[in-house]
Amino acid sequence: MLLCERHKKEKTKLPLVYNLVIYNGKEVYNAPRNLWDLFTDSMIAKQLMTSDYQLVDLQSMSNDEIVRKKHIGMLEYMLKHIHQRDMLKLWEEFLIKFKHVLILDKEKGIFT
């Protein structure tokens, strides 16, 4: 990935990567030679890995929208505001906004 990042700074497109395995084992090589054959569902794996990636743009989302997501929202909220200067204030805001989620978890016995 570092190679790709370095190349990305210089040009607009990434170079092609040619897959090559040089095998020199004692046994006959019998592993799948197709990457997709290594997955339990090769068709879904190929579709997921070759289609456009899913983007979650936290900066374009309102805090209310993030809070409604509950648990994943907790992670997204912290990621969105991680560069905030006053971390104590960030944690206070976080606990206020997600108090209902934490209380629910406690009632369900998730946290004791």
Image (cartoon, grey):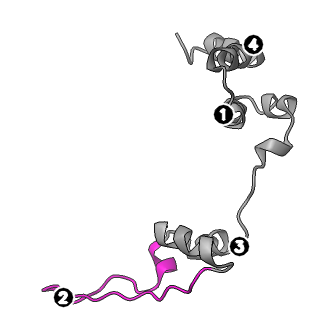
Disc 2 crowd rating (10 Å Cα; few below 14, some 14-19, many 20+) is: few
- Residue 24's tag is 2
- The image quarter containing residue 99 is top right
Q: Are marks 1 and 2 in contact (CB under 8 Å)?
A: no
Residue 7 placement: quadrant: bottom right
- Dot 3 or dot 1: first in sequence order is 3
Structural distance between the alpha carbons of marks 4 and 2: 60 Å
Between 36 and 68, the one nearer to me in the picture: 68
Q: Which residue is mark 4?
A: 96
Q: Amino acid at mark 1?
A: His
Q: How many marks?
A: 4
Q: Is residue 108 above or below residue 43?
A: above
Residue at mark 1? 83
Q: Estimate the spatial distance between the alpha carbons at disc 4 and disc 1, rounded to whole Å.
A: 19 Å
Residue drawn at x 70%, y 64% is 53
Badge 3: how crowded within 10 Å, few (<14), some, or many (20+)?
A: few
Q: Position of residue 93 (x, y in %)?
A: 74, 16
- How crowded pointer 1 is (Cα within 10 Å; few <14, some 14-19, many 20+) is rated as few
Point out the frontmost of discs 3 and 1.
1
